[in-house]
Amino acid sequence: MPEPTVQPGRLEGLLHVLPAPIHDERGFFVRTLDAASLSAAGLDPRRFVQENQSRSRRGTLRGIHFRRALSEGKLVRCARGSVFEVVVDLRPWSSTFLELEEVVLDDERHEQLFVPPGCGHGFQVTSDSADICYKHDAVYEPSLEAGIAWDDPELAIAWPLSEPMLSERDRIQPRLADVRPLLSTWFGATRPTRGGDAAAGR
């Protein structure tokens, strides 16, 4: 069976994982985790400690979410349907600070994204419904949850569908301008040392 390929993204530390599904008249078979490919790209698959799954209706928008510490990376895939995925780099020391990476994740190409710690993440469902699976490399810690408004004018994300379906939490997320002074406290003002590379997703 062909092995997945792993390619660096535009954002520092972000990885695109491209499986090689096999299709026939019955459907398809795809390897969704390949330790050798991830290890070769510098991502130890043993780091993942939790996997979660969400199901959302068309138009649902979740995000932009992140953790207020340089301590959680996510491997994200769309197991059913399709979503417009957005990652924003919130690490002040990063070469791609405040830049965006946008990609369509779906159940045809089966592409996955590794979202490094210190990046915000969100998506909007563009199919009738979608299942998103997240592998996390840190246990859930609600006290560290944070976010930025989905319609922040500074980020100016071009979401594909108007009038998104939002949770109450996402309706009241702060603007980037309000959290920007805190980013160096949460993620560090300077690049982590060599020992901190794993936490930084490098």
Image (cartoon, rainbow, N blue to C red):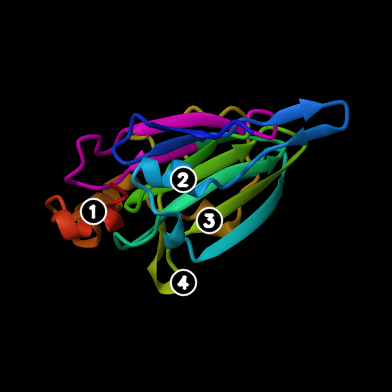
Can you say whether 62 is above or below 48 in the image?
Answer: above
Residue range of the region highlighted in magenta in the rendering: 86-109
Q: Position of residue 27 (x, y in %)?
A: 83, 32
Mark 4 or mark 3: name the one nearer the start of the chain.
3
Between the residue at mark 3 and the residue at mark 1, the CA separation in whole angstroms equals 19 Å
93 and 171: which is toward the camera: 93
Can you say whether 54 is above or below 97 in the image?
Answer: below
**Residue at x-position 48% and y-position 59%:** 136
Mark 2 or mark 1: name the one nearer the start of the chain.
2
Is residue 95 covered in magenta? yes
Question: Which label belongs to residue 197?
Answer: 1
Give left or right: position of 156 versus 199.
right
172 and 49: which is toward the camera: 49
To which residue does mark 2 refer? 36
Question: Which label belongs to residue 142?
Answer: 4
**Of the residues shown, which amino acid type is indicated by label 1?**
Asp
Between the residue at mark 4 and the residue at mark 3, the CA separation in whole angstroms equals 17 Å
Helix, strand or loop at label 2? It is helix
Marks 3 and 2: in contact by CB < 8 Å?
no
Q: Position of residue 105 (x, y in %)?
A: 59, 34
**Of the residues shown, which amino acid type is indicated by label 4?**
Pro
Helix, strand or loop at label 1? It is helix
Give left or right: position of 63 versus 191.
right
Helix, strand or loop at label 4? It is helix
Marks 4 and 1: in contact by CB < 8 Å?
no
Mark 2 or mark 3: name the one nearer the start of the chain.
2
